[in-house]
Image (cartoon, rainbow, N blue to C red):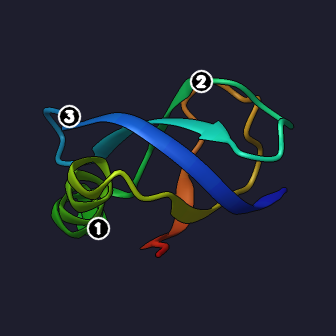
């Protein structure tokens, strides 16, 4: 389980409506990788991700297993 601060460098939306996020743990527990929102939260998560990228701010996220392929981001927010 990961619950902390991440750097984000890219974001997009998948065909099924999930936000796709390229994240790296600021604490070093995992390097760049793709993580996904749930389909129902895709647009909201993408909006926060794009705000973070544009503002050069970090994000807060909870990921159940950050080393698993296609891991899902449970909580996602902008950090100042």
| Residue holding disc 1 | 41
Instruction: Please name whichever residue, 76 or 39, is drawn nearer the observer in this view of the structure.
Output: 76
Q: CA distance from mark 3 to mark 1?
A: 12 Å
Question: Where residue 39 sits in the image (x, y, percent)?
Answer: 28, 56
Instruction: Please name whichever residue, 74 or 9, is drawn nearer the observer in this view of the structure.
Output: 9
Disc 3 element: loop
Which mark sits nearer the N-terminus, 3 or 2?
3
Say which quadrant the N terminus sits in. bottom right
Q: How many marks?
A: 3
Instruction: Please name whichever residue, 23 or 66, is drawn nearer the observer in this view of the structure.
Output: 23
Question: Where residue 72 sits in the image (x, y, percent)?
Answer: 55, 49
Disc 1 element: helix
| Residue holding disc 2 | 32
The image quarter containing residue 52 is bottom left
Instruction: Please name whichever residue, 71 or 77, is drawn nearer the observer in this view of the structure.
Output: 77
Which mark sits nearer the N-terminus, 2 or 1?
2
**Number of residues whose C-alpha sits closer than 10 Å to that of mark 2, classed few (under 14), some (14–19) or many (20 or more):** some
| Residue holding disc 3 | 14
């Amino acid at each position: 389980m990961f619950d902390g601060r991440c750097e984000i460098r890219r974001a997009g939306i998948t065909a099924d409506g999930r936000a796709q996020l390229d994240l790296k743990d600021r604490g070093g527990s995992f390097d760049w990788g793709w993580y996904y929102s749930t389909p129902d939260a895709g647009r909201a998560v993408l909006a926060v991700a794009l705000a973070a990228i544009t503002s050069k701010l970090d994000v807060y996220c909870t990921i159940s297993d950050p080393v698993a392929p296609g891991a899902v981001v449970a909580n996602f927010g902008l950090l100042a």
